[in-house]
Image: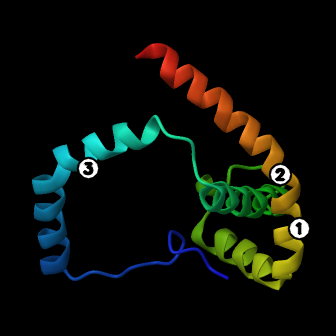
């Protein structure tokens, strides 16, 4: 089970340019939507996705000996990703389920802070 975020997308120069134009054109609309969505509680499925991601990052941290995963070389990241693929999905889901209450609590605190400000 690979996340869409982690999949590499190869674009041609023309595709990259086109996406840039679209992004510039829709920037204000996306910013407004993001600000609106920030004030809402995440759905259960969003929280579950976040928990799954957190479980994966726990293993990344463990396998990288506490180093920052983003600062590792491509080869080191590849080795870690290969080890992550060997972990059964059921185990990751079990850990994610255990992390869920903590994430819910953090989400409620985040909402309180956002709603206080404005």
Residue 99, position as x, y percentages in the image: 83, 51
Q: Which mark is residue 30?
A: 3
Among numbered discs 2 and 1, the one appearing first in the sequence = 1
Asked which secondary structure carries label 3, the reply is helix
Quadrant housing residue 35: top left
Disc 3 crowd rating (10 Å Cα; few below 14, some 14-19, many 20+) is few
Seen at 35% across and 44% down, the residue is 34
Q: Is residue 7 above or below residue 115?
A: below
Depth order, front residue of 12/48: 48
Q: Is residue 103 above or below residue 45?
A: above
What colour scheme does the image use? rainbow
Q: Is residue 38 left or right of residue 2?
A: left
Instruction: Using the numbered discs, state the Cα–Cα distance from disc 3 to disc 2 in whole angstroms.
Output: 30 Å
Disc 2 crowd rating (10 Å Cα; few below 14, some 14-19, many 20+) is some
Q: Which residue is mark 2?
A: 99
Instruction: Using the numbered discs, state the Cα–Cα distance from disc 2 to disc 1 in whole angstroms.
Output: 9 Å
Residue 100, position as x, y percentages in the image: 79, 51
Residue 73, position as x, y percentages in the image: 60, 64
Asked which secondary structure carries label 1, the reply is helix
Quadrant housing residue 105: top right
Q: Is residue 34 above or below residue 8?
A: above
Seen at 70% across and 75% down, the residue is 81
Depth order, front residue of 39/10: 39
Among numbered discs 3 and 2, the one appearing first in the sequence = 3
Among numbered discs 1 and 3, the one appearing first in the sequence = 3
Is residue 41 visible in the rendered image? The answer is yes
Seen at 30% across and 46% down, the residue is 33
Seen at 16% across and 54% down, the residue is 26
- Quadrant containing the C terminus is top left
Q: Which residue is mark 1?
A: 94
């Amino acid at each position: 089970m690979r996340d869409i975020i982690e999949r590499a997308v190869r674009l041609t120069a023309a595709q990259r340019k086109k996406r840039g134009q679209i992004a510039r054109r829709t920037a204000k609309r996306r910013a407004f939507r993001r600000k609106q969505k920030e004030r809402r509680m995440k759905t259960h499925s969003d929280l579950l996705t976040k928990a799954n991601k957190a479980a994966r990052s726990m293993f990344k941290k463990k396998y990288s000996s506490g180093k920052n995963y983003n600062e590792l070389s491509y080869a080191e990241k590849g080795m870690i990703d290969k080890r992550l693929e060997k972990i059964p999905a059921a185990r990751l889901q079990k850990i994610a389920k255990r992390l869920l209450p903590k994430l819910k609590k953090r989400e409620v605190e985040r909402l309180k802070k956002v709603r206080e400000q404005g």
